[in-house]
Image: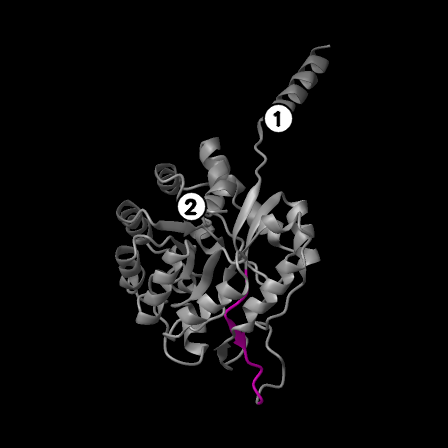
Amino acid sequence: MVATRLSLACVLALCSVFASAREYRYSDAHLHYVDFFQESAGMNALLEAMAKNRIEHVMISGVPVAKKWHEDEPKRPRYYAGDDADAYWYSATDVIVAAAVSKLPADKRPYFHPFLSGFNPNDKNSDAHIQRMLDLNPGLWQGIGEVFTRHDDLTALTSGDTPRANNEAMTRIYHLAAENDLPVLLHSNITSKREKNPLYLAEIEQPLRNHPHTRFIWAHAGTSLEIHRHQVQMDFLLPTLTRLLESYPNLYVDLSWSVLRPYLLDKAGKPRPQWLALVERFPERFMLGSDVVGRFNKLGEEMHSFDPFLDALPEAVARKVARDNFLAILPRKR
């Protein structure tokens, strides 16, 4: 009888744990419909992955560069870093995204939020190109990006000059973004692979200061896997990010995978208290992104990997980060 009561107590305790477990609905604030060869698993695969994993909304963009299969390479590379062949700016990526979204049933379209990315950030003609794209598809585009500026080895492999987030061409784009109420998702590494200081901080901070009416989403908070391979963890990232959030209310942060580890979670997979405190202090400024590229079989895994961090936040804050903050940054007329 005692054993029966103990078993029943254990069952009730387990039921209580499961009943109190949170189940999140997500917005993916950073998803590429195509890969670096402008190929995709397709919209049906994306819809299936969303439905299986409670991902209600997605930012959907192309990839602004295409990787060349060079004449001297016997095997087609699988990724931009697969060989030394260069990459080049590829405007048709937006045409691919527009076509995929336009073919969706009308009841599905409200859950897809296309961002324009197919332009050269070094070209002062790019703002005119973006305006033409906006005019060709009125009401379709809801943001600009992901804009590739400082981006590890991809920067060196891409034909032309090194793009900077604070150059004159991008300045023209920020003005256009503000005029059209479009957020800008910007990839701008905070430093190089070997410099243990915020070497390129001015390139992101100058636009934040000079364009207060433009909403910026900083992809990966300036981090990258390549930086981590050399530096493991940047000690200056948290205090720098804290200062930027304090100073610039137009800054939002995409907590995609290279921020999750080693920053949000420690080696044991436990949330870091100082990062929890930062998100709680700025509960409307952080959002989640999978950063998947053309394939969607790991979409759910990427989004659910944030659950331990979300579970350690107050529930109202966690739900904002998981879903609502991305929707709040979209054009207000929507």
Categorize mark 2 by other alpha carbons within 10 Å: few (<14), some (14-19), many (20+).
many
Q: Which secondary structure lies at badge 1?
A: helix
Magenta residues, as a range?
61-71
Residue farthest top in this picture? 1
Whether residues under marks 1 and 2 lie with C-beta atoms below 8 angstroms apart, the answer is no
The residue singled out by tag 1 in the image is: 19
Does the magenta run of residues contain 69? yes
Tell me which amino acid carries mark 2.
Phe
Residue 94: percent from left, percent from top = 55, 67
Q: Main secondary structure of the magenta part?
A: loop
The residue singled out by tag 2 in the image is: 286
Using the image, determine if residue 12 lies above or below residue 154. Answer: above
Question: Could one spot residue 80 in this view of the protein?
Answer: no
| Residue closer to the observer: 135 or 275 | 135
Tell me which amino acid carries mark 1.
Ala
Q: Which secondary structure lies at badge 2?
A: strand
- Which residue appears at 44% of the width and 47% of the height? 329
- Which residue appears at 38% of the width and 62% of the height? 176
Residue 29: percent from left, percent from top = 50, 51
Residue 320: percent from left, percent from top = 47, 38
Does the magenta run of residues contain 206? no
Give how far apart the Cα atoms at labels 1 and 2 are. 27 Å
- Which residue appears at 58% of the width and 26% of the height? 20
- Which residue appears at 35% of the width and 50% of the height? 251
* Label drawn at residue 123: none
